[in-house]
Amino acid sequence: GAVVSQHPSRVICKSGTSVKIECRSLDFQATTMFWYRQFPKQSLMLMATSNEGSKATYEQGVEKDKFLINHASLTLSTLTVTSAHPEDSSFYICSARDSGAAVNVQFFGPGTRLTVL
Amino acid sequence: GESVGLHLPTLSVQEGDNSIINCAYSNSASDYFIWYKQESGKGPQFIIDIRSNMDKRQGQRVTVLLNKTVKHLSLQIAATQPGDSAVYFCAENGDGNKLVFGAGTILRVKS
């Protein structure tokens, strides 16, 4: 139980293109999902909180027009990196909070390695 | 722990020994804590959690200890195995259902 998938696992794109990353909770419902970014040998940096049926909440310093988030269903959130540049290259990880759980346990996807050339 | 500064702290243990990974958290009002294990190139994996009304919780080969007085959390791994090698993060419950992560500790298991 409590499986979260991400797709794609790895993507290489040219500068200026947009990339969409999907995050799915496979066996539970998640009204809230989270998107993180992680640089090598560092901790996870929260980018935004994705809320089903409403607008995402972005952390300070994260451009909402650059990182578009859509949470259209209880099991799917997408992150689109628009007009990607080499500095956007990173490891992007999503997590999903089990809506049925009494505690704020989050389960993470396997991550997406984005390389922008 | 050994290395500090710009690098993640590293704990090196011999296979079969017990490991203790420590974490200091920031918010005295935090009511829930989680330990995650992250292997290279993968997402964090849930290990064990604990609520603030407890000071100890045991799982399979793992134990989490919570000391609210000094805002300290530890993860004990019994009979450490090579497969335990990873980065370990503690996380505390923050505002708006966010999790606040610690810096992480690298665990290296020597065979």
Image: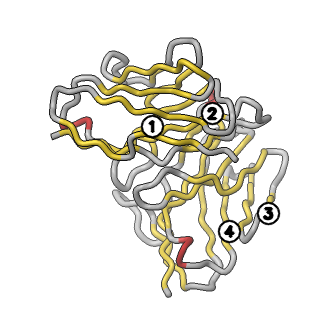
Type of the residue with mark 3: Gln
Type of the residue with mark 2: Gly
Of callouts 2 and 3, the N-terminal one:
3
Question: What residue did someone put label 2 on?
Answer: B94
User: Is the Cβ of the residue at disc 4 closer than 8 Å to that at disc 1?
Assistant: no
SS assignment at label 3: strand
Q: Are marks 2 and 3 on the same chain?
A: yes
Q: Residues within 10 Å of mark 1 (few under 14, many from 20)?
A: some
Q: Residue at x 78, y 45 (%)?
A: B51
SS assignment at label 2: loop
Q: Which mark is residue A36?
A: 1
Which percent across, then down, holds residue A28? 69, 35
Q: Is residue B41 above or below residue B110?
A: above
Q: Residues within 10 Å of mark 3 (few under 14, many from 20)?
A: some
Q: Residue at x 60, y 62 (%)?
A: B22
Which percent across, then down, holds residue B89? 55, 54
Q: Residues within 10 Å of mark 4 (few under 14, many from 20)?
A: some
Question: What residue did someone put label 3 on?
Answer: B58
Question: What residue did someone put label 4 on?
Answer: B76
Gap between marks 1 and 2, in whole Å?
15 Å
In which quarter of the view is residue A27 placed?
A: top right
Gap between marks 2 and 3, in whole Å?
23 Å
SS assignment at label 4: strand
* Chain that bears disc 2: B
